[in-house]
Image (cartoon, helix red, strand yellow):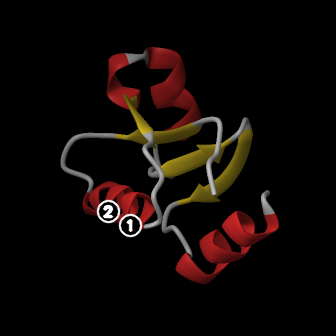
Amino acid sequence: MATSEVILYTRSGCHLCNDAAVLLKRYGLQPTTVDIDADPALRERFNTCVPVVVIDGKERFRGRVNEVLLKRLLQAGQ
């Protein structure tokens, strides 16, 4: 299943962010990684809740990515 866009909002040293990237790639997704600390507005918005995963313009996960829900989203075509 191909998605048009996956964005992973992250920050350096975030182990949950690393876990999210690995999981997304395992399901064939190629997320664009955005470091929230490089943009004050993003840091303000997402400071305590990274990783944040946005799939096709919809925020789907904050904090930990739930693999079961990710599978369901991909099977349903979002």
Above or below: residue 16 compared with residue 40: below
For the point 45% across and 58% down, the residue is 28
Along the line of sight, the residue nearer the viewer: 26 or 57 = 26
The quadrant holding residue 37 is: top left
**To which residue does mark 2 refer?**
22
> Which callout, 1 or 2, points to the residue nearer the camera?
1
Q: Which mark is residue 12?
A: none
**To which residue does mark 1 refer?**
26
Outermost residue toward the front in this view = 1
Q: Secondary structure beneath disc 2?
A: helix
Outermost residue toward the bottom in this view = 68
Above or below: residue 43 compared with residue 13: above
The quadrant holding residue 24 is: bottom left
Residue type at tag 2? Val
Residue type at tag 1? Arg
Above or below: residue 42 compared with residue 55: above
Q: Residues within 10 Å of mark 2 (few under 14, many from 20)?
A: few
Q: Position of residue 35 (x, y in %)?
A: 35, 30
For the point 68% across and 65% down, the residue is 74
Q: Position of residue 18 (x, y in %)?
A: 28, 57
> Does residue 66 appear left or right of residue 35 in this picture?
right
Q: Position of residue 53 (x, y in %)?
A: 56, 49
Q: Secondary structure beneath disc 1?
A: helix
For the point 18% across and 49% down, the residue is 13
> Is there CB contact under 8 Å for labels 1 and 2?
yes
For the point 40% across and 30% down, the residue is 34
Q: Residues within 10 Å of mark 1 (few under 14, many from 20)?
A: few
- Label 1 and label 2: CA atoms lie apart by 6 Å
